[in-house]
């Protein structure tokens, strides 16, 4: 990963449920992925030809080497965990939905823009709540590569 | 990964859209994950304490070291790609929804049971269609760790 560009977001603040409001946005640092890393992830977790070889990618619906969607998801998670989404208690997802409007390509530089869509304090557990967060993973041309709308468990201030 | 148990599913058949019916099921091989591998994935992609250290996991909502949900997703993808879901043209997802009813733990042995929920031939592209596939990732006690309901692009027979 030495070759990859990564800018850190240095967040000293972390947000409890009570600190959030609908429409609030968070922007992550950036991470550039190259062909070798796309192939390395694919060899371990998604060994399909269009994620492993340029020619097979070109012959597929992707029209070129394409990162596994799960690789995009994993790189997105890293950007969020490294300051892109500074929630108190960490980023704990119960689930959500995921879409890949277009694949991540070699040389793409990813960043993630997250927006609070809904805040639901728990009725049974007064110390926490659910935040519905939409996180768009975009490349350097601001094309949307992934959209995750997740239900996150976020603690309340004591 | 030498220490991990993995049984291969050797599928010589691959399924086109025309070969599928609603309710059809596919079962993957098995894969056992240990604490080192959980931590290794977390260090690279989801560096949060409850995925990295036993003590931090015990002190969290997980009550013990827990794999990143994205690690469970990636291991699920590998089981599907290695014969667990033998679709013609590979496993190409446009998106879907994902839930993690409980986390993957060290020593869990995963397998994936997939079921065809819906088959939607494309109106505009007669050579393909969308298959809605529900894939449950279960451990050795048949506890469900992840449920993905995905929209897959599947080719038709020529």
Image (cartoon, coloured by chain):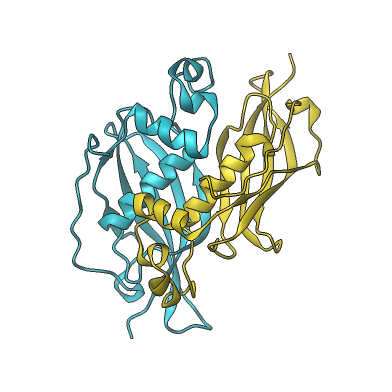
Chain colours: A cyan, B yellow
Q: Is residue B39 above or below residue B76?
A: below
State the count of labels.
Answer: 0
Q: Which of A157/B8 is in front?
A: B8
Quarter of the image for residue A11 reads bottom left
Tell me if I can see residue B23 in this picture: yes
Q: Which of B51/A100 is in front?
A: B51
Q: Which of A91/A38 is in front?
A: A38
Q: Position of residue A127 (x, y in %)?
A: 42, 82
Q: Position of residue A148 (x, y in %)?
A: 45, 49
Residue drawn at 56 percent across, 60 percent down: B100
Q: Horizontally, is A96 left or right of B8 in the view?
A: left
Q: Horizontally, is A22 left or right of B69 in the view?
A: left
Residue drawn at 57 percent across, 61 percent down: B107
Quarter of the image for residue B58 reads bottom left
Q: Position of residue A53 (x, y in %)?
A: 46, 21
Residue drawn at 53 percent across, 53 percent down: B72
Quarter of the image for residue A38 reads top left
Q: Is residue A85 above or below residue B61?
A: above
Tell me if I can see residue A68 in this picture: no
Q: Is residue B43 above or below residue A59?
A: below
For the C terminus of chain A, the quadrant is bottom left
């Amino acid at each position: 990963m030495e070759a990859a560009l990564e800018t850190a977001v240095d967040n000293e603040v972390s947000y409890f449920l009570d600190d959030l409001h609908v429409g609030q946005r968070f922007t992550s640092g950036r991470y550039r992925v190259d062909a070798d890393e796309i192939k390395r992830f694919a060899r371990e977790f998604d060994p399909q030809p269009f994620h492993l070889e340029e020619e097979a990618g070109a012959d597929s619906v992707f029209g070129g080497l394409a990162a596994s969607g799960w690789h995009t998801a994993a790189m997105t998670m890293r950007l969020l965990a490294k300051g892109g989404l500074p929630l108190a208690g960490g980023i704990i997802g119960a689930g959500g939905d995921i879409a890949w409007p277009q694949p991540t390509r070699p040389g793409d530089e990813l960043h993630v823009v997250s927006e609070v869509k809904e805040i639901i304090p728990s009725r049974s557990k007064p110390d926490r709540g659910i935040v519905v967060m939409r996180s768009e993973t975009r490349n350097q041309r601001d094309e949307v590569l992934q959209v995750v709308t997740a239900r996150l468990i976020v603690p309340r201030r004591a």
